[in-house]
Image (cartoon, rainbow, N blue to C red):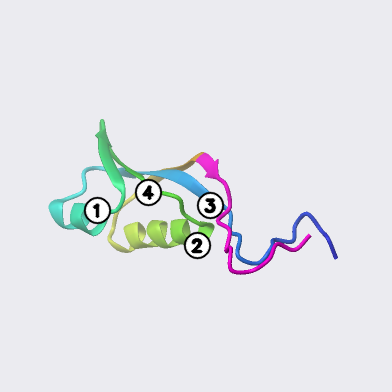
Amino acid sequence: MNSPQRRQKGRRRQRLMQVSVAGPLGPVLRRAFADRRITTQGAFTVLRTGPSTDRDLTDLVQTLDDRGLMVESVHRITDVPPKVDDSEPDIG
């Protein structure tokens, strides 16, 4: 079965994403998200993720929501080529 929907083992679609939340992030949350680029744009704090999967993004939004932050928007910045696990041969 060679469907375009089928993903080869070891490859995951990753994206650079931008998540905007209402208001500022305090120092504790800024440290908790130190692996992300954080900027302030007017009344919003913007977190920009590095290459991440859909699951990573879901976890980030859930974490922000769990801490009482209002997620205003989530935007894809760009797609990143899939990671390849070179330990296994490509399936053609």
Q: Which is more toward the observer, 28 or 12? A: 12
Mark toward the viewer: 2 or 3: 3
Q: Upstream in the sequence, badge 2 or badge 1?
A: 1
Residue that carries the numbered disc 1 in the rendered image: 34
Residues marked 4 and 3 touching at CB (< 8 Å): no
Residue type, label 1 = Ala
Tell me the quadrant of the picture where the N terminus can be found.
bottom right
User: Spatial distance from mark 3 to mark 1, Cα to Cα?
Assistant: 20 Å
Q: Which residue is mark 4?
A: 71
Q: Is mark 1 in CB contact (under 8 Å) with mark 4?
A: no
Q: Nearer the viewer, mark 2 or mark 1?
A: 1
Residue for badge 2: 55
Q: Is residue 61 left or right of residue 25?
A: right
Whichever of callouts 4 and 3 sits on the residue coming sooner in the sequence is 3
| Crowd around label 2: few <14 · some 14–19 · many ≥20 (10 Å) | few
Say which element carries label 1: loop
